[in-house]
Amino acid sequence: MSQLTLIQLSNSTYYIPSPANVGLFLKNNKAILIDSGSDKEAGRQILKLLKEHNMELSLIVNTHSHADHCGGNEFLQKRTNCRIAATAMESFLIESPILESSILNGGFPHKRLRNKFLLAKASIVTDVIPNCGQILDTSLNALSIPGHFLDGIGVETSDSVLFTADSIISKEILSKYHIHFLYDVRSHFETLEMLKNRTDKLYVPSHGKPASQVEFRDLVDFNKYKIEENIDAVLDSISSEITAEEILALVCNHYSIEINANQYVLIFSTVRSILSYLLDEKQVDVSYSAGQMLWRRL
Ligand SMILES: [Zn+2]
């Protein structure tokens, strides 16, 4: 991992660019982190940075429980005894990370799925917080951003920076990978609509660069466009009765995606979430025959 750096964004708000950006809010030399990086090494480098800047870690606010967002928790909590805050549903997975790979696999995760990308080290959530409003006694507010995962939050600072977690993905990443992890499609569309009406000074997606309001609105539109494209790719693959796994293969072929163990469960999960959305929207139906679940268009 290349050396992490600390970049000031506003009076009290900083961020540490990394594969999943880490936010930092500073008050009287006490630092609050927004997420903790992807693993122990990220945690080690974050702690080094804090020490170099004479900052003391008091709290980690986790936007959600995906391993690349809470992977540094365990190391940082062990070293500093910091508090960790997350919403109730996300806290279950932060404390028992085997649940994440179990949900993705829909059963006990085999060895190849028990890796650092899908299985963070367990840490203790000291503060279960609501998904909106002031976070404990800090100058941060939680913003509910359902859709990407179970009960994720964005974090708004008192100096008008909004950390949008995985609700928004950069154009570069979406153009390269085409389909990203998505749990609840209908809620995600509502989240995108809500984000488009925000009036913060600066926006920091976890996977992408900080954006002004104009840039951010354009980014929200692009995210919506890509998800609509993903939905069309699923619908176009249903020309006759077909299994979800066959749909996955056709979607991967459409986007020329080569899959490995992690991508298989992540993309398949998104395809099944899209199918659930389409079933609820009455655009597809499903039947069960000869041990198969078969999808068809309506
Ligand atoms: Zn995520």
Image (tube, grey):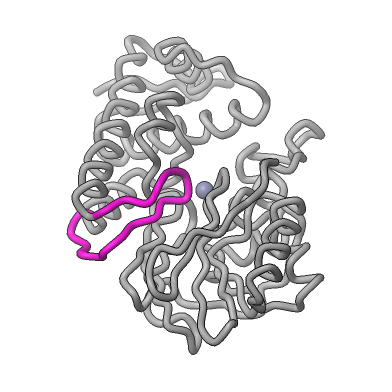
Q: Is residue 112 above or below residue 221?
A: above
Residue 255 visible here: yes
Left or right for 47, reference 144: right
- Quadrant where the image shows the C terminus: top left
Q: Residue at x 45, y 34 (%)?
A: 180
Which segment is the magenta one? 196-212
Relative depth, front residue between 170 and 194: 170
Q: Residue at x 73, y 35 (%)?
A: 113
Indicate the position of residue 59 as horizontal and vertical percent values: 61, 76
Left or right for 170, reference 100: left
Quarter of the view holding residue 118: top right
Quarter of the view holding residue 108: top right
Q: Residue at x 63, y 71 (%)?
A: 53
Indicate the position of residue 91 as horizontal and vertical percent values: 61, 67
Indicate the position of residue 295 as horizontal and vertical percent values: 40, 22
Q: Is residue 172 above or below residue 68?
A: above
Check if residue 258 falls in the magenta segment. Answer: no
Left or right for 280, reference 110: left
Indicate the position of residue 175 as horizontal and vertical percent values: 37, 26
